[in-house]
Image (cartoon, rainbow, N blue to C red):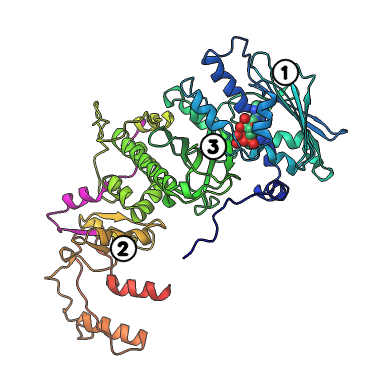
Amino acid sequence: MTMLEQGTISIHTENIFPIIKKWLYSDHEIFLRELISNAVDAMQKMKMVSMAGEYSGEVGEPEVVITVDKDNKQLTITDNGIGMTADEVKQYITQVAFSSAEEFVEKYKDSGDQAIIGHFGLGFYSSFMVAQKVEIDTLSYKEGAEAVHWSCEGNTDYQLEASEWNQRGTKITLTLMEEEIEYAEEARIKSLVKTYCDFLPVPIKLGDEQINKQKAPWKESPSNLTDEDYLEFYRYLYPFQEDPLLWVHLNTDYPFIVNGILYFPKLKPDIDVTKGQIKLFCNQVFVSDNCEEVIPQFLMPLQGVIDSSDIPLNVSRSFLQNDRTVRRIADYIAKKVGDRLKALYRDDRDAYIRCWQDVGTFVKFGSINNDKFKKQIEDILIYRTTAELAPAPEPTAEPAIENSEDTTDDAWADSPTDAKEEASAASSEPPHTTLKEYLERNQERHENQVYYCTDEVNQATYVSLLKNQGLEVLFLDTFIDTHFVPFLEREYTDVKFARVDADLDETLIDKDQAAEIVDPTTNQTRSEIIKALFEKSLDNSNLTIRTEALKSDTPQGAPPAMVLLPESARRMQEMMAM
Ligand code: ADP
Ligand code: MG
């Protein structure tokens, strides 16, 4: 093909501007998040500059001050950060999509690890979604810098002039559009700060009152937090909910940065397990309630916070792309959850059993869905059993060091101490066993055979028959087990899983007490009597009926009669029903 022309695409600011203003961000309210982020960035930068020894003045306590003036439709956001010189305003503000963040971080990378939120150089312009006029008064920390005033009325023209502003830092003044006057309401501003900026590391004040919580527990080292701290944070995030069962504190910065605290909630019908519950943050700024891509599907019911500056976000930060890093973070979370559970299983079996009813559901779902996770936790899958087992062993004094390639500074919070105290008081948890233990225990009686019950009430007769004969039954009776039993069968192809009402164990049949005994009154065998009874009741003379005598030499005796439905026939029925 012959090349006709090669060139550069040109952009007309006057055309692109309305697009940025109206459509880049779906939500007008996020302008406040953007301006506060910029203010916080400016103060973090000030810290870094000072640490690099490039500023000899007093840095002072950082704070963001917001004021509202409803009569004049004005909103101001003031910081005591690095400020900007006239040249910087021209460079960073008047050039759309030009951010100083990368250059700055590169230059001061050795001066502390203050996280800078800015990135794309677009956030500032979101203020034009709500303001008819935006003004900046700013004074740079740089020696000899003079204060400047910049103003723009939402078109491509701006004015830059000298300013009266006499304190280091920046004041942004928005004159709101008529239809956006709600942003001059104190209550509205408070609630926005709560949503987006609650955990930003500097005080954010409305007038004199600090309105953000400021402390982000997930950024703390786990060793600095008590159980009560974790619980308190949970109650703060999810008021009016039952306390969580346990939690996982994520804390890594290699190969990606992820901090967070994830909670296993007590599962309740009103928790929608198909919808993500975790709040996503980026450098402590709230991004979204929906970060389903970052959470492995089977951990969807988890609650809490994930903060990662490595999660690629588009500029509106409200849509996550399903890219490689995101998938790797999801894998990491799955692994950390697995580690946490293994540690609990190892260190406090009773506590583990106590939350199994709920946590087990996640784990089983994860085993079915995630091969890596399955391999990690298959040894700690447990089942409630009819066997009378000795209490769980005391935690070993020297816990086995887990073989982990992880070199990061991860640490795990303990499970709640009150749970531990309860555990030591009495081991009242129903006995649970692993599949391996079950098979070993019952090897002599029936090799590679597992009896299970899916409905404790309706299958009670069968369970007690087996139990009375010294056979062990596992309970697979939660909603996930409908999927989990077929999974087990696929996994353990040499093990036969039989529901208690399927086939009778050979050892339960009394071969001597043959069912062929002739009944003296009717002169028929018992088999014949039963066959006739069924044929009549079902109006079908084409039945194959096998009758066996049950052993009755148990304290409770055998039930008078039991109907069995072979496993394959029952599955067929269930499939048809579906
Ligand atoms: P970003 O924050 O992604 O860099 P913005 O459009 O929000 O993009 O801001 C552009 C640039 O303007 C910032 O990188 C910063 O250099 C400068 N800036 C914005 N607000 C302030 C402020 N309050 N103090 C100092 N500099 C600021
Ligand atoms: Mg910004």
Q: Residue at x 36, y 84 (%)?
A: 537
10 Å crowding of disc 1: few (<14), some (14-19), many (20+): some
Q: Residue at x 27, y 81 (%)?
A: 530
Q: Residue at x 58, y 50 (%)?
A: 8
Instruction: Give me the C-alpha separation between circle 1 and circle 3.
Output: 33 Å
The quarter in which the C terminus is drawn is: bottom left
Question: Which sits in the foreground, 159 or 576?
Answer: 159
Q: Estimate the x, y position of residue 338 in percent, counting from the top left.
A: 34, 42
Q: Estimate the x, y position of residue 348 in percent, counting from the top left.
A: 32, 34
| Above or below for 1 versus 180 | below
Q: Estimate the x, y position of residue 20 in percent, counting from the top left.
A: 68, 47
Which labelled disc corresponds to residue 469?
none
Q: How many marks?
A: 3
Q: Secondary structure at mark 3?
A: strand
Q: Are marks 3 and 2 in contact (CB under 8 Å)?
A: no
Write down the residue under mark 2.
486
| Above or below for 569 versus 393 | below
The reply to whether residue 346 is visible in this rendering is yes
Question: Which sits in the foreground, 325 or 567?
Answer: 325
Q: Estimate the x, y position of residue 553 in percent, counting from the top left.
A: 18, 60
Q: Is residue 448 magenta?
A: yes
Instruction: Give me the C-alpha separation between circle 1 and circle 2.
Output: 74 Å
- Highlighted magenta segment, given as a residue range: 425-450
Which comes before the other along the chain, label 1 or label 3?
1
10 Å crowding of disc 2: few (<14), some (14-19), many (20+): few
The reply to whether residue 198 is visible in this rendering is no
Q: Secondary structure at mark 2?
A: helix
Q: Secondary structure at mark 1?
A: loop
Amino acid tagged 3: Cys
Which labelled disc corresponds to residue 146?
1
Write down the residue under mark 3.
282
